[in-house]
Image: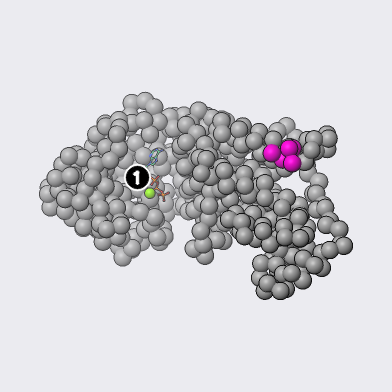
Amino acid sequence: MTDISKAPTIVDAASCGLAPGGISSHARQVIERLKDAGYTAYLVGGCVRDLILGKEPKDFDVVTQARPEEIRQVFRNARLIGRRFRLAHVHFGREIVEVATYRAAPSDGPEDDGGNVFGTLEEDAFRRDFTVNALYYDPDEGLITDYVNGLSDLAQAQLRVIGDPEARFREDPVRMLRAVRFAAKLRLRLTEDGRRLLPALGPLLQDVAPARLFEEVLKLFHTGNALATYEALCEHRLFEVLFPGVAAVLGPHADPDSLLARALANSDLRIAEDKPVTPAFLFAALLWEAVQEEAVHSIAEGAPPAEAWMQAAEHVLREQLRIVTIPKRFSVPMREIWSLQSRFERRAGRHAFRFLESKRFRAAYDFLGLRAAAGEAQESLFDWWTRFQEAAASEREAMVAALDGQAEKRPRRRRRRRAAGG
Ligand code: ATP
Ligand code: MG
């Protein structure tokens, strides 16, 4: 129940377990300066939520009563950004603190389309998506202001939509993806009334701008909880809306043995180890099973393999772009990762040496590793390439020489299930 009284609850932050030590000194400074100039100002959103949960916030967002022009007058180092909704970026060397003016919910249209509709602190709280994202913290006084019972939801690990969930999801369908992302990342449980709506309202995501969905897909899969997020997206029937071609092949449920699940688990591990991850590789893994299904099917019907793979890649990508944009700078290397897979099978003569020198070798090799683990390429082939990279020059010659006479084996293809219904 969102039975909300008008008067906010104001609570001592320490009693909620908020450790002030984790706050950026720049954000703190911004709030102090705004308050000194006579405006109210708070930290809000993900950073307050994360601090209470004992997690390190990604960034610190400040909201204030001051209008954008007024914010600029307080800070020398502030720049106004945003065409429709103006907000200020206060620069401290490489750190930027985002400062927004309180705003009311736009009367219609999604969050993104809102123009400058300034509002009160209370209106600012109610236009936000989830109660745990609408907590205001004044680090100066050490107090949290809560209009929406967010503190009690947070204490009970509940993710609750502010207001009527159906209306809020219809107003901005991306909130459904945010719900799944926050639930997976923060181990919160979306309240039943919200959960129930996801399968039915999921298709509304088809009306969201594909460029915005690209940004959301990166947040879903590139923030260290990709596997759990994928499972939750499947559970709530949202994955099939974002990636219909892939879901038709993999089925509606997350398959832990699929190449995709392995790729996501692997990228979670890389993020945990502070290693880089790239959208090209992510999308290569996301779409691969659809490409491979289509190519194998065409080849079985007599199409020449090289052409079959190329056309499958092109077709799968084209269909995907109707829903989620994949900028060229990522889709080009993605397709390269796919097309290079056949080169691992050609090792004789100078082939292996030349391939090793190519710019995209490493990504293609990592992808081969996923295919081998998923039972779709030979482990022995992957092992050979692992050794070949590590070997000294003379040893490499010997490895290639040893291949002579030994016919290159074709990889065994895993039999695939076609999802019922699709
Ligand atoms: P994180 O940055 O850790 O992913 P966050 O909660 O800070 O999580 P942001 O996307 O940075 O998420 O948004 C900041 C705040 O803006 C949110 O906490 C929420 O209060 C509000 N907000 C963001 N997107 C929406 C939306 N689509 N609808 C309503 N409120 C939103
Ligand atoms: Mg944030």
Can residue 404 be seen? yes
Residue 241 within the magenta-colored segment of the rendering: no
Residue 88 lies, with reference to residue 56, above or below; the image says above
Residue at image position (20%, 51%) is: 77
Horizontal side of 315 relative to 129 (left or right) equals right
Identified at 44% across, 32% down, the residue is 172
Residue 273 image position (x, y, % from top left): 52, 65
Residue for point 40% across, 39% down: 129
Say what amino acid the circle numbered 1 marks.
Ala
Q: Which residues are magenta?
A: 306-310
Give left or right: position of 284 versus 272: right
**Is 20 placed left or right of 280 in the picture?**
left
Indicate the position of residue 90 as horizontal and vertical percent values: 24, 50
* Residue bearing mark 1: 134
Query: Height in image: 315 above or below 363?
Result: above
Nearer-the-camera pick, 374 or 59: 374
Q: Is residue 296 above or below residue 164?
A: below
Quadrant into which the C terminus falls: top right
Disc 1 is placed on an element classified as loop
Residue 402: where, in percent of width, then height?
82, 68
The front one of 301 and 260 is: 301
Does mark 1 have its CB less than 8 Å from ligand 1? yes
Q: Which secondary structure class fits the magenta region best?
A: helix
Residue 81's spot in the image, x, y percent? Answer: 28, 40
